[in-house]
Image (cartoon, grey):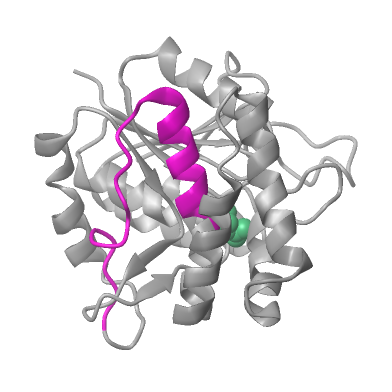
Amino acid sequence: MDKIVCKFGGSSAASAEGIRRIKAILNENPARRYVVLSAPGALEGGPKVTDLLEQVWREGGRGPAAEAVVSRFRDIRAGLGLPPGDEAVRNVLAAAVRISRAHTLSRGEYLCARLFADYTGLTFVDAAPFVCFDTNGGLDVQRSITRLSVLPSMYLRAVVPGFYGSDPSGNIITLPRNGSDITGALLAAAVHATLYENWTDVPGLMTADPSRDPDARLIPVIDYPEMRTFAQNGARVLHPDCLAPVEQAGIPTRLKCTMQPEAAGTLIHI
Ligand code: ASP
């Protein structure tokens, strides 16, 4: 039976409407069993939640940036008919700044995945014990895949926050920016997914940046080595470090657009 791991980027999770759309996409195909979420992205030219969290850390947890994060989550929750939860968000931020910068930055994904679990009834599985870093802060790919591979025996479906894990002492460590792509790829490899779907706000891999080049075309099919070249040359649609885990596990990746779920997007094949 098909088993799909879906990762949704911050642009897809930026508003209540976006969260509703993600739920509808999951409901469309029961094989979409594991979901990795980023933190809410930019809204109408404003900052991404992760950028606000950088400010929260600098402000020591109780300033305008913290209130901006509280209000982003309040608006999403209100739009979904969920209770506000302002105090809970404030407490999470206040606790995080007492721990570390990485802990603070990771709370966007944590809170977003918690919210999505509240809204959908999916089980929330924290990434911290499953995505493993070594004592030098380097991602331990093999160990992470081994840890994550127990998930299907525990949960038929789950939502997992992207972008962070923990080191052997339990400290939260973050991946590079846009690193939720890597969390999704590790999870896909670990659960032997038949497909890794990476959902963003663009139609797929384009021959050029469509905002600069009106002749930019969608590339419907590409293989992993070609995709790696695009990613290393600055194509921002996927984090380059997410390619190896899925390629080595023999899993294709499909780039999909949340705004056009019926469109085929780009298939990255083995
Ligand atoms: N939220 C983080 C960022 O803005 C990680 C991610 O979106 O994957 O980079």
Quadrant containing the N terminus is top left
- Give whichever of 195, 161 is nearer the camera: 161
Q: What residue is at 47 percent from the left and 27 percent from the top? A: 119
Q: Quadrant of residue 266?
A: top right
- Give whichever of 245, 55 is nearer the camera: 55
Quadrant containing the C terminus is top left
Q: In which quarter of the image is residue 241?
A: bottom left
Q: Is residue 40 above or below residue 144?
A: above
Q: Can residue 201 be seen in this view?
A: no
Q: Where is residue 189 in the image (x, y as percent from the top left)?
A: 25, 46
Q: What residue is at 60 percent from the left and 17 percent from the top? A: 263
Q: Where is residue 234 in the image (x, y as percent from the top left)?
A: 67, 61
- Range of residues picked out in magenta: 108-134
Q: In this view, does 104 lie above or below 7?
A: below
Extreme-front residue of the structure:
87
Q: Where is residue 9 in the image (x, y as percent from the top left)?
A: 57, 43
Q: Is residue 33 above or below residue 25?
A: below
| In the image: residue 237, left or right of residue 114 | right
**Count of all numbered marks drawn on residues in the image:** 0
Q: What residue is at 26 percent from the left and 75 percent from the top? A: 170
Residue 127 part of the magenta-drawn span = yes
Extreme-bottom residue of the structure:
136
Residue 13 part of the magenta-drawn span = no
